[in-house]
Image (spheres, rainbow, N blue to C red):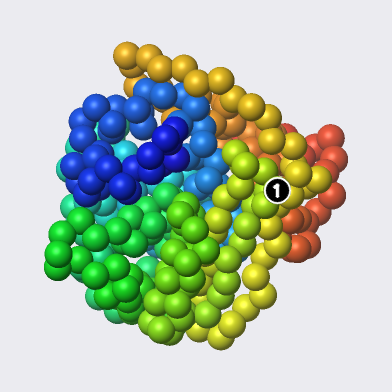
Amino acid sequence: MACSGRRPELRGPPELYYDKKEARKYVRNSRMIDVQTKMAGRAVELLCVPDDKPCYVLDIGCGTGLSGDYLTDEGHYWVGIDISPAMLDEALDREIEGDVILGDMGQGIPFKPGTFDACISISAVQWLCNANKKSDIPAKRLYRFFSSLYSVLVHGGRAVLQLYPENSEQLELITTQATRAGFTGGVVVDYPNSAKAKKFYLCLFSGPSSSIPEGLSEDTEEEKPAESTFTAERIPYRIARRGVVRKSREWVLEKKARRRRQGKEVRPDTQYTGRKRKPRF
């Protein structure tokens, strides 16, 4: 959602800003797809969901379903909510595997209590900090959003919300309303010294407080610049993920590295890691 010049939230309501033209960028611009997919992967990593069972995940501001594609690839089930009809139309055209609904997160999350195991959101929550009409009061909309999110998560569920706060006051407004709604947690900042790579992740717990994961730094992982290409065709999701195929050796090594960063015990890598085994008869 980051853009050059004026912030998207200041250009108008999201349902108008994300029109058909803008929505197409999320299925045809290779760099945008790559950035969204990486942020979704980092959000799932920060969720620390168990490896041994699929989870039912809510994706807030799901857009064209890029983050949902990542959830599917990780073996999870998901439901997405977004305010832009154009973005959801693109998601449906792509034949995503999750379910999507049209809705305004500032009006609350329309699901029964305890529906979801976890929640992720990519580049959406900061939109609630802007009043697009006189009846919009950011603090009230944020509280309604967080209180309903707290309700739809199971006890002990987690939410990781990637966001672009405009300033420290806006970030404080968001975290204050999350705390009022009952959440514990904190903010993880990746690459804090980088102007381009810096990312904020609000990690929330709907139960006993847990330790906040550490943010990534330039020493942890080298950020490589990526060129942007724009085509008239939709870019397949697996190409967007640099050809990382589920259950391949590269996929297994990437997942094991992610679990090590989470502090989990992982078997050492060997020449047999990710090896295809013959079927049993």
Mark 1 sits on what residue? 193
Q: How far across and how far down the image is residue 173, in percent?
A: 42, 71
- Which residue is at a point 43% across and 50% down the rendered structure image? 122
Q: Is residue 57 left or right of residue 110?
A: right
In the picture, which quadrant includes the C terminus?
top right
Above or below for 180 versus 230: below
Quadrant for residue 60, please give it: bottom left
Above or below for 279 versus 193: above
Q: Is residue 212 left or right of residue 126?
A: right
Amino acid carrying label 1: it is Asn
Quadrant for residue 131, please give it: bottom left
Q: How far across and how far down the image is residue 262, in percent?
A: 70, 60
In the picture, which quadrant includes the N terminus?
top left
How packed mark 1 is, by other alpha carbons closer than 10 Å (few <14, some 14-19, many 20 or more), is few
Q: How far across and how far down the image is residue 6, in percent?
A: 38, 39
- Which residue is at a point 64% across and 38% down the rendered structure image? 251
- Which residue is at a point 81% across and 45% down the rendered structure image? 219
Above or below for 250 versus 100: above
Can residue 83 be seen by looking at this rendering? yes
